[in-house]
Amino acid sequence: MASTKMGNKNRKLGKAKVLENLLMPSFLLKIILQLDCNPRTWELVEYALEDLSMKHAWEGRA
């Protein structure tokens, strides 16, 4: 029988720095397809998060 344990080596992060990074504008590449599924238009869209509340911020292995 084999057993394993998941290592939890997470560290708490400062909320102010994480919140500042989340509130910065972000970008998304939208690809609009034609009827034959070939790309017709590519759009670079800027978006921002609003009314964001954060309870915890953690850092760990991904």
Image: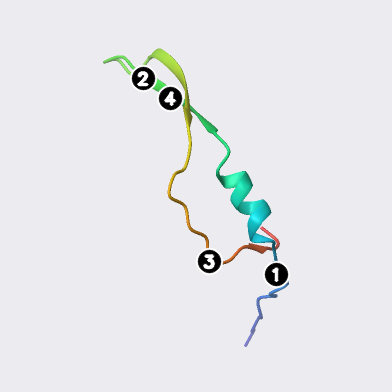
* 28, above or below 16, in the image: above
- Within-10-Å neighbours for mark 4: few <14, some 14–19, many 20+: few
Q: Residue at x 40, y 13 (%)?
A: 41
Amino acid type of the residue tagged 3 in the rendering: Lys
Q: Residue at x 26, y 15 (%)?
A: 35
Q: Extreme top residue here?
A: 40
Which residue is under mark 1? 10
Secondary structure beneath dot 1 equals loop
- Residue 23, which numbered label? none
Q: Nearer the viewer, mark 3 or mark 2?
A: 3
Residues at marks 2 and 4 touching, judged by CB atoms closer than 8 Å: yes
Amino acid type of the residue tagged 2 in the rendering: Ile
Q: Residue at x 62, y 47 (%)?
A: 20
Q: CA distance from mark 4 to mark 1?
A: 34 Å
* 2, above or below 38, in the image: below
* 36, above or below 5, in the image: above
- Within-10-Å neighbours for mark 1: few <14, some 14–19, many 20+: few
Q: Nearer the viewer, mark 1 or mark 2?
A: 1
Q: Extreme left residue here?
A: 35
Along the line of sight, the residue nearer the viewer: 9 or 54: 54
Earlier in the chain: of badge 3 and badge 2, it is 2
- Expressed as whole percent of the image width and height from the top left, the position of residue 55 reads 53, 66
Secondary structure beneath dot 4 equals strand
Q: CA distance from mark 3 to mark 1?
A: 16 Å
- Within-10-Å neighbours for mark 3: few <14, some 14–19, many 20+: few
- Residue 32, which numbered label? 2
Q: Residue at x 52, y 60 (%)?
A: 54
Amino acid type of the residue tagged 4 in the rendering: Lys
Which residue is under mark 4? 30
- Expressed as whole percent of the image width and height from the top left, the position of residue 48 reads 48, 37
- Residue 55, which numbered label? 3
Earlier in the chain: of badge 3 and badge 4, it is 4
